[in-house]
Image (cartoon, rainbow, N blue to C red):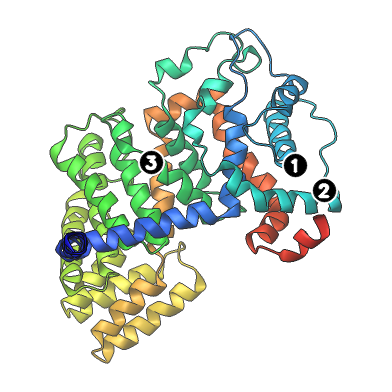
């Protein structure tokens, strides 16, 4: 009897603790579970992660050797890191092309492609307990080979205070322009970034803004809000030391000195994006907070002298909300002239203006947030700014760093060749199991 009472008591405590969770905590937990499931179950992520583990598990040289594909194949032939032979073949091809080496026969027959699909289908279980960050970073591996560095940059990772988080951030930035790799791969890279391991310069809030941007694209609005709030807190409470105070801000402006403009713009952009995330939440309280963020951005944009797609879009939202019809339509007209908008977005602006004329402000706001893609407008500005930071430029000046930046581009190209096999595995075709087993 006492055991039954103890069991009931534990159940009651568990129920009470669940009920004590705030709505934010419940939604954050739900979205984290969704993201973890997406990454764990994606065959595209499995292949991508497998390729990176194979490269990161390459032998680290003494700084005097060149990369030897034959030796690499032998080193990986009997290892237990990853057994998938066709995935290894793609990995050798990537390394070979990256360094202009002969990798032997690289084409893949239809039968080999079918075997690759089967391997990809099984790869998820093979690497599910592997963490790529348990291996040396790609930059550490590349900079250890004299054939890449010329023998005089083996200490590059130490000079940059390099770590896995910095590497994930650089690769995630390059992947933003990927044409073949699915968004799931970018989600994986950004999920591996622990911003506590970034230096206290502009790159830290920039990383958090990029995380918020991509999480919003995946409709994980609470996770997006969390990342963007971290960026705002960093800029509000920590002494961010700019790596290049004279660098141009995200959006060129003449009203403030570059040093002040860089920090203020990052703050304004984080507030704007957080407002966008909150605007999409099914919560009246969050929706109201969104307009506070938007108004903050409009005020900052005015001080900074920002007059582009971002200020026009957010200005339109604020003035539609405030039922200032003339100002709202003025900003929409400005936005309509932008060459960054697609044809369907331009058509949507006429639809929004018609809704304003009919006093349907709520419908106008929802149409605006659904049909005008803010992430596309903003990401191009942020990428240009990131590429101009001293951190990124420092990497790009070195031979090993250049190869690191080229790596995700080559992986993207490889995916375009073998993507159909990977997608077949993604669909979980039972036919291949029958043919190959």
Q: Position of residue 301 (x, y in %)?
A: 22, 55
Disc 2 to disc 1, C-alpha distance: 8 Å
Q: Is residue 190 above or below residue 401?
A: below
Secondary element type, mark 1: helix
Q: How crowded is mark 2: few (under 14 residues within 10 Å), some or many (20 or more)?
A: few
Which one is nearer the viewer's eye here, 412 or 340? 412
Percent x, y of residue 266: 26, 45
- Determine the image quadrant of residue 62: top right
Q: Tell me if residue 307 can be seen.
A: no
Tell me, for residue 378, which label it has, or none: none
Side of 266 relative to 56 (left or right): left
> SS class of the residue under badge 3?
helix
Residue lying at 66% horizontally and 53% vertically, measured from the top left: 121
- The CA span between labels 3 and 2 is 43 Å
Q: Are marks 2 and 1 in contact (CB under 8 Å)?
A: yes
Q: Is residue 286 placed above or below 54 in the rendered structure?
A: below
Q: Which mark is residue 385?
A: 3
Label ID, residue 112: 2
- Label 3 and label 1: CA atoms lie apart by 38 Å
| Quarter that holds the N terminus | bottom left
Specify few, some or many for label 3: CA neighbours under 10 Å numbering under 14, 14-19, or 20 or more. Answer: some
Disc number at residue 86? Answer: 1
> Looking at this rendering, what residue extends furthest in the bottom direction?
358
Look at 25% across and 62% down and name the residue there. 26
Along the line of sight, the residue nearer the viewer: 111 or 236 = 111
Task: Answer above or below: position of 302 versus 284.
Answer: above
């Amino acid at each position: 009897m006492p055991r039954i009472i103890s069991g009931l008591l534990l159940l009651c405590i568990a129920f009470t603790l669940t009920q004590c969770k705030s709505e934010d905590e419940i939604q954050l937990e739900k979205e984290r579970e969704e993201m973890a499931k997406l990454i764990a179950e994606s065959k595209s992520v499995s292949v991508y992660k497998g390729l990176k583990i194979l490269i990161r598990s390459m032998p680290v040289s003494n700084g005097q050797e060149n990369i030897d594909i034959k030796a690499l194949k032998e080193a990986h032939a009997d290892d237990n890191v990853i057994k998938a032979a066709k995935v290894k073949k793609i990995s050798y091809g990537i390394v070979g092309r990256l360094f202009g080496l002969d990798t032997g026969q690289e084409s893949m027959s239809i039968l080999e492609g079918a075997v690759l699909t089967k391997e990809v289908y099984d790869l998820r279980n093979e690497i599910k307990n592997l963490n790529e960050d348990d291996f040396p970073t790609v930059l550490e591996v590349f900079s250890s080979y004299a054939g890449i560095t010329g023998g005089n940059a083996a200490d590059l990772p130490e000079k940059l205070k390099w770590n896995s988080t910095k590497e994930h951030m650089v690769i995630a930035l390059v992947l933003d322009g990927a044409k073949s790799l699915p968004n799931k791969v970018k989600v994986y890279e950004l999920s591996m970034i622990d911003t506590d391991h970034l230096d206290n310069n502009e790159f830290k809030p920039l990383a958090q803004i990029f995380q918020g941007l991509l999480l919003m694209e995946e409709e994980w609005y609470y996770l997006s809000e969390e990342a963007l709030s971290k960026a705002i807190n960093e800029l509000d409470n920590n002494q961010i030391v700019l790596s290049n105070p004279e660098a141009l801000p995200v959006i060129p402006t003449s009203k403030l000195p570059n040093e002040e403009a860089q920090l203020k713009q990052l703050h304004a952009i984080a507030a704007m994006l957080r407002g966008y995330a909150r605007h999409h939440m099914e919560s009246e309280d969050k929706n109201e907070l969104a307009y506070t963020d938007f108004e903050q951005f409009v005020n900052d944009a005015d001080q900074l002298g920002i007059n582009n797609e971002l200020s026009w879009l957010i200005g339109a939202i604020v003035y539609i909300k405030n039922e200032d019809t003339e100002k709202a339509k003025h900003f929409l007209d400005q936005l309509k002239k932008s060459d960054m908008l697609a044809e369907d977005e331009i058509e949507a602006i006429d639809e929004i203006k018609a809704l304003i004329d009919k006093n349907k402000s709520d419908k106008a706001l929802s149409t605006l947030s659904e049909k005008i893609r803010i992430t596309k407008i903003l990401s191009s500005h942020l990428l240009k700014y990131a590429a101009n930071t001293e951190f990124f430029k420092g990497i790009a000046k070195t031979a090993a760093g250049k190869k690191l930046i080229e790596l995700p581009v080559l992986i993207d190209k490889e995916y375009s060749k073998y993507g159909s096999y990977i997608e077949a595995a993604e669909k979980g075709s039972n036919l291949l199991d029958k043919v190959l087993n």
